[in-house]
């Protein structure tokens, strides 16, 4: 299958320019918050947008094309402080939403569909590609830079149309966390330096969720709430608590009293 694409430099400049242009109005109006939830989009003072996952890590959108397979615009992006952003460990790159489009790279003649988990499945014939994506299937292929190709894994090839349904695959993959096969019944909050506090400072999740506080600071901390108490946590240590009752629960660091957080539990 032969296709024509922009050069890498043209494509990179185009996607960066488009991303910056679209985000500019949003960034100028954004207010800084410490309240955000798993599954939401966050950024610092810069333009890079991240997906905040339940495992307490942030995942990067490598380019505008990847972003727009998941979201229509930037209206849901929350701005947090640079200190809080740096407290959240990086989890990796976001990959294309499964089912959205086919992809290929300049150095590989194969065309792939994307399955959940970032798996690439080779579409073995042009007729099969047309069956999967319609008569305009050639317009449903994005060229992915070689540098981003390593974010994916190669799965089994598509031999027949019954092996893959693009619409169903996209519909059943509703979040990046699900695509990365993360346990969405668990939440991680990172304990940062005193000036950055708990990250997120306030978070909302469903009843029955297990929360893990991870001390990402170089100093000791102590989680203290009305019905949960971690004791002293040295750097790198964790504390877990399951919230089985709906309500709002405030907590603090027993060592650094200015560090305070809120847990909101819903049914």
Image: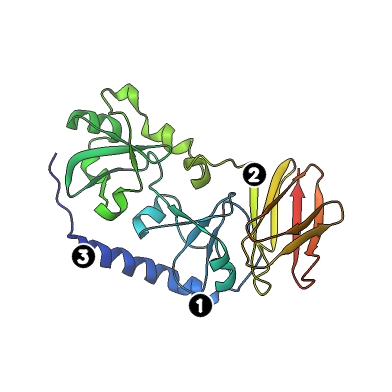
Taking depth in this image into account, of 130 and 27 the one nearest to the observer is 27
Q: Which residue is mark 2?
A: 186
Q: Position of residue 47 (x, y in %)?
A: 44, 70
Q: Which residue is mark 1?
A: 28
Q: Is residue 67 visible?
A: yes
Taking depth in this image into account, of 170 and 43 the one nearest to the observer is 43
Q: Nearer the viewer, mark 1 or mark 3?
A: 3
Distance from the alpha carbon under mark 1 to that under mark 2: 34 Å
At x 58% / y 40%, what residue is drawn? 183
Picture disc at residue 9: 3
The quadrant of the rendering that contains the N terminus is: top left
Would residue 182 be found to the left or right of residue 129 on screen?
A: right
In the rendered image, which quarter is residue 138 located in?
top left
Would residue 102 be found to the left or right of residue 49 on screen?
A: left
In the rendered image, which quarter is residue 158 located in?
top left
Distance from the alpha carbon under mark 3 to that under mark 2: 40 Å
Furthest-front residue in this view? 234
Q: Residues within 10 Å of mark 3 (few under 14, many from 20)?
A: few
Q: Position of residue 32 (x, y in %)?
A: 61, 73
Q: Is residue 79 visible?
A: no
> For numbered disc 3, what is the local secondary structure?
helix
Which badge, 1 or 2, comes first in the chain's sequence? Answer: 1
> For numbered disc 1, what is the local secondary structure?
helix
């Amino acid at each position: 299958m032969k296709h024509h694409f922009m050069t890498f430099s043209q494509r990179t400049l185009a996607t960066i320019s488009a991303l910056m242009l679209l985000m500019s109005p949003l960034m100028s109006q954004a207010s800084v918050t410490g309240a955000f939830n798993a599954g939401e989009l966050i950024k610092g003072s810069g333009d890079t947008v991240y997906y905040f996952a339940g495992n307490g890590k942030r995942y990067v959108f490598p380019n505008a094309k990847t972003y727009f397979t998941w979201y229509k615009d930037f209206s849901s992006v929350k701005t947090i402080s640079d200190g809080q952003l740096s407290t959240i460990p990086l989890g990796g790159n976001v990959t294309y939403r499964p089912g959205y489009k086919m992809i290929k790279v300049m150095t590989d003649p194969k065309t792939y569909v994307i399955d959940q988990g970032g798996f690439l499945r080779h579409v073995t014939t042009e007729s099969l590609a047309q069956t999967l994506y319609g008569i305009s299937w050639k317009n449903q292929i994005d060229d992915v830079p070689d540098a981003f190709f390593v974010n994916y894994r190669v799965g089994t090839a598509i031999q027949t149309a019954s092996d893959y349904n693009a619409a169903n695959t996209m519909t059943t993959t509703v979040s990046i966390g699900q695509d990365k096969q993360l346990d969405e019944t668990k939440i991680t909050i990172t304990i940062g330096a005193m000036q950055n506090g708990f990250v997120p400072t306030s978070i909302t999740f469903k009843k029955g969720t297990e929360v893990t506080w991870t001390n990402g600071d170089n100093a000791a901390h102590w989680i203290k709430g009305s019905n949960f108490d971690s004791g002293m946590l040295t750097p790198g240590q964790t504390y877990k608590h399951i919230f089985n009752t709906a309500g709002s629960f405030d907590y603090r660091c027993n060592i650094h009293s200015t560090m305070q957080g809120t847990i909101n539990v819903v049914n």
